Amino acid sequence: MKTEWNEECAVVGVYNAQNAASIAYYSLFAMQHRGQEASGIATSNGEKIITIKKNGLVTEVFCDETLNKLKGFSAVGHNRYSTAGNDSIADAQPLFARYDLGEIAIVHNGNLTNARQIRDELIKEGAIFQSYMDTENLIHLIARAKQENLIDRIKEAVLRLKGAFCFVILSRKKMFVIRDRYGFRPLSLGEIVNSDGSKGYVVASETCAFDLVGAKYLRDVEPGEMLIFSKNGMESQSIMLPNPHPCVFEYIYFARPDSRVFGRLVYDIRKNMGEELARENPVEADLVIPVPDSGVAAALGYSRQSGIPFELGIIRNHYVGRTFIEPTQQIRELKVKLKLNPIRELIENKRVVVIDDSVVRGTTSRQIVKILRDCGAKEIHMKISSPPTISPCYYGVDTPSREDLISAKMSHQEVCQFIGADSLSFLSVEGLKRSIGVENYQYCQACFDGKYIV
């Protein structure tokens, strides 16, 4: 069972760069938080596409030897966390194929809601699939499209898709970037300057990638937009009627706080959430502590608004691996202790406000409350910087089913009793809107209200 949220992946595309593979590598490294199952890069030198991908972290998949094999002026890259498909290497990206127009490599962030329907139709028509990923549908649709050139084939194929997608498609000479009409998942455009003064381009799921590789943020790729990169520069086309509904959970949890997502700095919004949480849910306490790392900015905001001192009362061990044998409840509790360790001297005999970004199944929150109790906390007030999560996501986020979401089946008071806190408060939907601070609020918040856009 899933006990936390997991973003599906990160994508990057690089065009007209002297060291395209290295730029893709460091971009993926900056976005490692978006997927840790597998990593891959494909490059083109104008004549041939070379692809290297493997299960593991970016630094485990690539080294100087492998990067030296990835010669070319353009590249696409991918960090994977599976929401569709399996965890075999066949389901890692980029996906590469040879077809009648040449060679192609594709990376994808999102989830296609009509993937099964399209896949079944293609199989009936004789298509042979090599993976379980919904992304492979696009390769087959492009290869079978009736148009003569690749641009028109991509358009024809993409218009058959429903759901969330950010595609970066590499041919031998061009690169194509497409974002779905709702803009569910983030995708940004940046510019790099080569050593000879020429300009190149980078697209990435988060702008923290630009900071690492020295790219200048230009703008977001617009919902429904296709960018075409060639030797003539960049061309933009609107291929779908835009209806923007970006995922609000990017602000709450997924994105790095130093990234600009949907045009806004994540750090600022998370602090705003903490301030709104303090206005809506005041309490008398001695200190505010975050659940690291995603609760830190909201805890700072809560502390500033409430006047209650902020302390890093829980320290996170960043070297705990993602996989761990969990045969017993005792071992599951040990996993939390390995990852999060409280500072007794700060907590003992104190009334503590604990700030976290969300409650999924409630098991982690329950264990955090327990370790704080064991440290002698006098009172524990759990404050959540988002509304209660009542519905799963179908747009590229790996979430539990509705039956496993504790707020979908319990009242606030019942959840509070389950986790063992003295009080439990959530940010309201209106407070969330105020935190983001946009007049025309059109974010997808189906995880909070069950109203699905597609």
Image (tube, grey):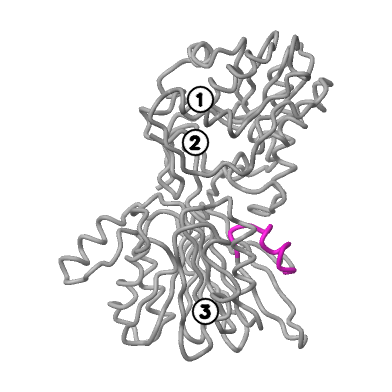
Q: Earlier in the sequence, mark 3 or mark 2?
A: 2
Q: Position of residue 349 (x, y in %)?
A: 75, 9
Q: Please, is residue 376 above or below residue 38 in the view?
A: above
Vertical comparison of 109 with 273: above or below = below
Q: Which residues are magenta?
A: 204-215
Q: Which residue corresponds to the image point at 60% horizontal and 31% vertical from the top-left?
A: 386
Mark 1 sits on what residue?
A: 333
Q: Residues within 10 Å of mark 2 (few under 14, many from 20)?
A: some
Q: Nearer the viewer, mark 2 or mark 1?
A: 1
Question: Which residue type carries mark 1?
Answer: Glu
Q: Is residue 322 left or right of residue 140?
A: right
Q: Secondary structure at mark 1?
A: helix
Mark before the other along the chain sequence, 2 or 1: 2
* Residue 326: % across, % down: 42, 32
The residue lying toward the viewer, choosing from 39 and 211, is 39
Number of the front mark, 1 or 3? 1
In this rendered view, identify the residue nearer to me: 349 or 274.
Answer: 349
Q: Secondary structure at mark 3?
A: strand
Q: Which residue is mark 3?
A: 43
Q: What residue did someone put label 2 on? A: 4
In what element is the residue under mark 2?
Answer: loop
In the rendered image, the vertical position of residue 88 relative to residue 386, given as above or below: below
Among numbered discs 1 and 3, the one appearing first in the sequence: 3
Asked if the residue at tag 3 contacts the one at tag 1, i.e. Cβ–Cβ closer than 8 Å, the answer is: no
Horizontal placement of 181 versus 122: left or right? right
Q: Is residue 380 magenta?
A: no
Amino acid type, label 3: Thr
Q: Is residue 428 left or right of residue 124?
A: right
Q: Report the residue at 65% width, 52% height from top.
A: 261
